[in-house]
């Protein structure tokens, strides 16, 4: 990593799987968030480590503490990669419009038990950090008028389900996360085996289920 590329203006952050990443982070500034780790990178969020994550010596070159690095990287990430939430059907239709497959007949009613929402960034890539964006979770709860569940579908995005839609189907969400992580994703694409819950009243997010 060239020293010339290291500046406060181009540091970003991501969330990564703690267990699969911990051996790679022995010489890197990091912090825990729930059961995940915050990592720092240059140019854009990099949750799969395609570029080297910042090292402790890089942080020293920036003249920053980890707290300062976190605040700066979070600000940069929020500014350059704004959060996006929309119905999952709309995201899939958008993606299919660039392929030869027809998006007109897309129907998720038989694939999922209840409506799901995409929650990531506007680039649809490396969006694991959106869960850290200021009061974003509270704003989503205001939109729904209730709490909700966050389902990590990869290091790039989450799926969201309203509390009232899930009811007694938390086991289904847990199985869905576990199954997708082991059948559809490579190990570096897995963010977590957990399901998270955002409580509207307490304004807190927590781990509620993990296989």
Image (cartoon, helix red, strand yellow):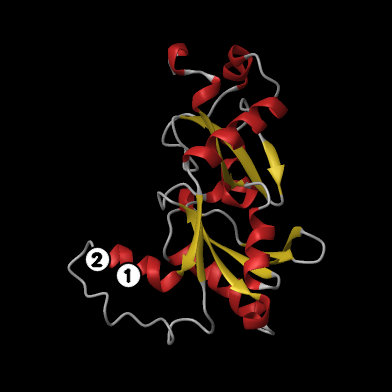
Image-quadrant location for residue 43? top left
Residue situated furthest bottom in the rendering = 110
Measured from the top left, where is residue 102 in percent x and y? 22, 75
Measured from the top left, where is residue 91 in percent x and y? 39, 65
- For the C terminus, the image quarter is bottom right
The residue indicated by pointer 2 is: 97
Residue situated furthest right in the rendering = 202
Residue placed most toward the observer, 120 or 23: 120
Say whether marks 1 and 2 touch (CB < 8 Å): yes
- Tell me if residue 195 can be seen: no
Measured from the top left, where is residue 148 in percent x and y? 66, 70
As measured in the structure, the alpha-carbon distance from the residue carrying label 1 to the one carrying label 2 is 6 Å
The residue indicated by pointer 1 is: 93
- For the N terminus, the image quarter is top left
Label 2: few (<14), some or many (≥20) within 10 Å?
Answer: few
Image-quadrant location for residue 90? bottom left
- The secondary element bearing badge 1 is classed as helix
| In this rendering, position of residue 120 left or right of residue 97 | right
Q: Is residue 205 depicted above or below 128 in this figure?
A: below
Q: Is residue 172 depicted above or below 24 in this figure?
A: below
| In this rendering, position of residue 148 left or right of residue 184 | right
Name the residue at 23% across, 61% down.
Answer: 98
Name the residue at 43% across, 87% down.
Answer: 110
- Tell me if residue 56 can be seen: yes
Q: Is residue 139 depicted above or below 88 in this figure?
A: above
Residue placed most toward the observer, 127 or 179: 127
Label 1: few (<14), some or many (≥20) within 10 Å?
Answer: some
- The secondary element bearing badge 2 is classed as loop
Q: Is residue 73 depicted above or below 163 in this figure?
A: above
Measured from the top left, where is residue 65 in percent x and y? 71, 21
| In this rendering, position of residue 205 left or right of residue 152 | right
Name the residue at 64% across, 80% down.
Answer: 166
């Amino acid at each position: 990593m060239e020293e010339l590329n290291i500046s406060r203006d181009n540091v970003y952050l991501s969330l990564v799987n703690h267990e699969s990443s911990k051996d790679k982070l022995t010489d890197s500034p990091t912090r825990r968030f729930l059961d995940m780790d915050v990592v720092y990178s240059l140019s854009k969020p990099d949750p799969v480590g395609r570029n080297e994550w910042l090292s402790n010596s890089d942080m020293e070159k920036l003249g920053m503490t980890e707290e300062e690095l976190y605040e700066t990287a979070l600000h940069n990430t929020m500014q350059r990669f704004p959060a996006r939430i929309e119905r999952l059907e709309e995201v899939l239709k958008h993606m299919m419009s660039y392929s030869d497959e027809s998006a007109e007949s897309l129907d998720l009613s038989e694939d999922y038990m209840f409506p799901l929402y995409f929650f990531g960034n506007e680039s649809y890539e490396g969006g694991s950090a959106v869960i850290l964006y200021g009061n974003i979770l509270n704003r989503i709860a205001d939109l729904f008028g209730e709490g909700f569940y966050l389902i990590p579908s990869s290091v790039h995005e989450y799926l969201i389900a309203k509390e009232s839609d899930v009811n007694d189907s938390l086991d289904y969400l847990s199985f869905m996360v576990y199954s997708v992580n082991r059948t559809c994703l490579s190990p570096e694409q897995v963010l977590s085996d957990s399901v998270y819950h955002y409580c509207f009243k307490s304004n807190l997010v927590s781990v509620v289920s993990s296989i």
